[in-house]
Amino acid sequence: MSARILIVDDLFPNVKLLETKLSLEYFDVLAAMNGPDALAICEKGLCDLVLLDVMMPGMDGFEVCRRLKSNPNTAHLPVVMVTALDQPSDRLRGLDAGADDFLTKPIDDTALFTRVRSLVRLKAVTDELRSRAMASRDFGMGDPLALAAAETGLDASILLVEDRPGSADRLAAALGQHHTLTVEGDPHKALVLATEGAFDLALVSLDLQGFDGLRLCSQLRSLDRTRTMPVMMIAETHDRARVTRGLEFGVHDYLMRPVDRNELVARVRTQVRRRRFSDTLRGAVQASMELAITDGLTGLHNRRYLDSHLGALFREATLRNRPVAALMLDIDRFKTINDTFGHEAGDEVLKAFADRVRTHTRGIDIVARYGGEEIVIILPDAEAEGAYGIAERIRERIEAVPFAIQRDTRTVSVTVSIGVSWRRPADASPADMLKRADVALYRAKSAGRNRVEAAAA
């Protein structure tokens, strides 16, 4: 996978060394010699990952990382800090600033390429979510990037897979202050727990007794229910080859024993924050999709949804010679309700009207607000007689119970007129069927309202 890598280092020889290594692996490379230039490049969206030197004059790498991660426009960028410092306190400081990982000089090529490829894969997924989530701003839902970037990464539900009681106790003690832990020593039971639970992260020991922990990591990454859950490996120093293998197939991070308590807490928080960042974007995408096809007042599908789905449904019915019917409903004298009680009361009636209509339809039916107080119901596999019966039940239900308005302080009687039609062999499109339903609705209105009329034979 190719990507654009930004190298940030004030020493030109360091930049050239990394540039040569990455270019040979077919990455595109950019360079910045100081923090402000790096921030400007990232702000313009010109890179996919940042290799950031810690020791720079003026604005050091910690500050650059902190600014990148606090800016909603750049918080999604993976940042790998490159440093000659190898003390746990230095790593903790970088993780607290939001760094996704560390590489220690002199840089091991295998570690460099493995981490870069792993983080680039994760960013590719996040980029897709970001581009789709931005559409939610068009629906007045606020800025999903700012909301996602504000995530703290605390109060997570964590699955710890560790069969050494002493190690499990130490890890639980370190994480229990900020998170809720479930400890399971049996990898088979752990897999079941992971698929049935709602964990924010899984910590897996690679050296489980009689079982390859890396296989469990692979299973967690491949199953639908756990694919988006971050997985972290806990490995012995002699297990670097397996760690590299895990990162290659999608494990998110790792810790080497003996595990530093502070680094454990910081890395877990980073992974949880990243997962929730993606979940927030994914939620914004889902919400924007629902808003795009849903009427905001009634919660029914809107005209756009009806138009986009009815054609395919009608063609399928025609191809298979299956029946399909349409009901067109219109609240009687709705303008009088608005004029007498106000538009807020009219909205209350429309919402309750939609709810009652919905209770008399099936999951396969399309129920859409057609415009104003009109609702269209499309009934797949419904013959003329059955469609008429459904329409009559809806009419009776609307008339039977008055509608509460003005926050349940008053009620108003409401009736509905309904036109019924069905697909005919000569119909060129669903518009022909809908037009007959509209004509039938007009006849119901003209004949005194509060009635059902079927399309003329």
Image: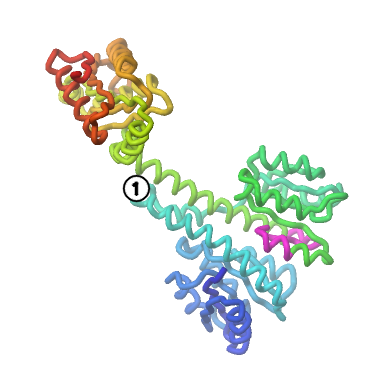
The amino acid on which the numbered mark 1 sits, given as a three-letter code, is Gly
Colour style of the rendered protein structure: rainbow
Specify the quadrant of the image occupied by residue 187. Answer: top right
Task: Residue at 68% x, 63% y: name it.
Answer: 248
- Along the viewing direction, whichever of 62 and 310 lies nearer the viewer: 310
Task: Residue at 24% x, 31% y: name it.
Answer: 427
Left or right: 217 with respect to 296? right
Residue wearing tag 1: 140
Residue 269 at x, y percent in the picture: 64, 55
Left or right: 81 with respect to 30? right
Residue 328 at x, y percent in the picture: 25, 25
**Residue 260 is inside the magenta segment:** yes
Residue at the extreme bottom of the image, as rendered: 13
- Say above or below: 267 vs 408: below
Q: Is disc 1 surrounded by few (<14), some (14 to 19) or many (20+) residues within 10 Å?
A: few
Task: Residue at 25% x, 32% y: name it.
Answer: 370
- Indicate the quadrant containing the N terminus: top left, top right, bottom left or bottom right: bottom right
Left or right: 264 with respect to 385? right
**Residue 146 is inside the magenta segment:** no
Question: Magenta stretch?
Answer: 244-262
Helix, strand, or loop for circle 1?
A: loop
